[in-house]
Image (cartoon, helix red, strand yellow):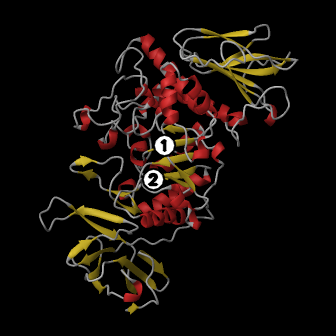
Amino acid sequence: MNHTTEKPAPAGVVWLDEGVEFSVAIPRGKRCVLNLYRSKKERPYRSIEMKEDILYGDIRSSGLQKGIREGDEYLYLIDGEDVVDPYAHMVCRYKDDTSGSTQSKERGVLVSPDFDWEGDRPLCLPDEDVVAYSLHVRGFTKNSASKVKHKGTFEGIIEKIPYLLELGINQIQCMPVYEFEDHIRLVSNYWGYGSAYCFAPKKRYAHVNPVTELKRMVKECHKAGIEVVLHLPFFEKMSKQKMIECLKYYRQDYHIDGFIVNPFVVPLEVIRSDAYLTNIKLIVKKDEFQNVMRRFLKSDEGMVGSVIWQLRHLSQNESSYNYITDHTGFTLCDLVSYDGKHNEANGENNQDGPDYNYSWNCGVEGTTRKKAVIKLREKQMRNAFFLLLLAQGTPCILAGDEFANSQNGNNNVYCQDNDTAWLNWKKLEKEQWLFEYVKELIRFRKEHRIFHPKREFSGIDLTHCGVPDVSYHGENAWQVPDGIASRQIGIYYSGAADGEEDLYIAYNMHWECHSFALPSLSKGKHWEQIFSTEEREGFLNEPIDKKQERKAEVSERSIAVFRGVKDGQSEKTVE
């Protein structure tokens, strides 16, 4: 029995106590029939004419329908052609055995919106306190060594929450999780770009029900204090209005904390003009930090001025975040192991993927047994993580970099839905030292407000303590090394504003050792060294007292950290 409502519901499916209502936009003059199916049945069990009504323009409504069950499938028959609801909240695909076609059938699936959120809300963590982690839902746990029960799924991420917490992560950034085409022109579409059913979580990423399992993943992440951010790249033919509706849908129905969007596809001001999305976290990708730090890491000349700016600049002020590696490009391990890309397996004659990677193989292309090269690569990875995690903007780690995950030199794994792109969790055991190093760096960042300030440092003595909040030095104190050939810099952070200890960091990305003059501290204090990327652990077991020294030697391609302590207060261990 049909019950006509006063006006059609928004596009898509609406569940009400009295029944279910379907609404769809259909150009005038076209005939539209809603066909309802029991799971995988060939013939519909109910067909409903979707009539035009001049009052509602192109929107047509079924009226309220009773007797419909969760799990039922549906299609719109528009002028004789089957069309999947572009607003479907779930989509199923299965082989069409009746037509002899090799293509899969697609249908919308009815799934109840009921879910016990247990009072959950988006976390709204301050951007300056976020340490983000970029992952691919399938690739994160699909590898056989991931040690999760439901590999490659939302449930797999839930199983890895303790791992993320141990590392110190409080935000995950997920590549597209909606129902995209798995193959485009016979090529695997691993990343999920291109046309898609943007309102439907991907069934392949679920054990049973993608809608409830994505919601459960978000809820469990929130319980652990971890935000969930989604990449929503959208596609060219999608209207701006539909993009806005999609953002609102995931915010309201899935409690998503924020979105990474392409500002050239949907400008941020357009999104923020919607009252519902005014205060949502909107993030865009910018390559400046990545390119500057990669070039500094490999000892390019003329980078000091740009490095100073990137280390101090709060990326979140521009709705961005800092990263050295991302899903587009090399992993960190490959960044220090390959001079050139090796994308032959993609089938495009190695013509795809970024040509300019600012990478350096440390002397040998690809894998090697040479101990000196391995040692240098390990140090370069330690340097890279330091540059990322001790810059003052919001950092984002590429999943697997913390245990030297490799893609064998492939810098464009968009079509590699296999072990090339999946995280190799066997390396976690082999490279446990790197995981521990990154974990300690994150802890150090969180413990020192000067590395994640609420406001950008000014270089001015705002507390009248005698030194500015941040100052820049070279081999000589208080002299910025701005020469084109300079590859070293010292940064003095005053802890006076936040009641913290003073810290001095000496960056030497030159291939030769350099001596750094230590800036003078206030009377009754002196410097002691607590950290060096020359060491595998980074943090020294016993600080090195510098009370009697005015300079500190910093070895080639390494970073050292010194802290100001009161005379007679040198500690044997770093807290």
- Which element type, helix, strand or loop, lies under badge 2? helix
Q: Quadrant of residue 203?
A: bottom left
Residue 558 horizontal/vertical position (percent): 57, 17
Where, by quadrant of the figure, is residue 232 drawn? bottom left
What residue appears at the point 14 percent right and 68 percent down from the top-left corner?
98
- In the displayed structure, 37 sits above or below 438; it is below
Question: Which residue, given by chain and number where applicable, does mark 2 sit on?
Answer: 154
For residue 286, side relative to residue 234 (left or right)? right
Q: How many marks?
A: 2
Three-letter amino acid code at disc 1?
A: Ser
Q: Which residue in the rendered view is the most extreme toward the left?
A: 100
Q: Which residue type carries mark 2?
A: Phe
Which quarter of the rendering shows the N terminus? Answer: bottom left
x and y, in percent, of residue 161 in the image: 54, 46
Between 511 and 575, the one nearer to me in the picture: 511
Mark 2 crowd level (few <14, some 14–19, many ≥20, 10 Å Cα): many
Residue 489 lies, in percent from the top left, at 62, 19
Upstream in the sequence, badge 2 or badge 1? 1
Q: Residue furthest right?
A: 523
Provide the residue designation for mark 1. Answer: 134
Q: Residues within 10 Å of mark 1 (few under 14, many from 20)?
A: many
Residue 532 location, quadrant: top right
Secondary structure, mark 1, is strand
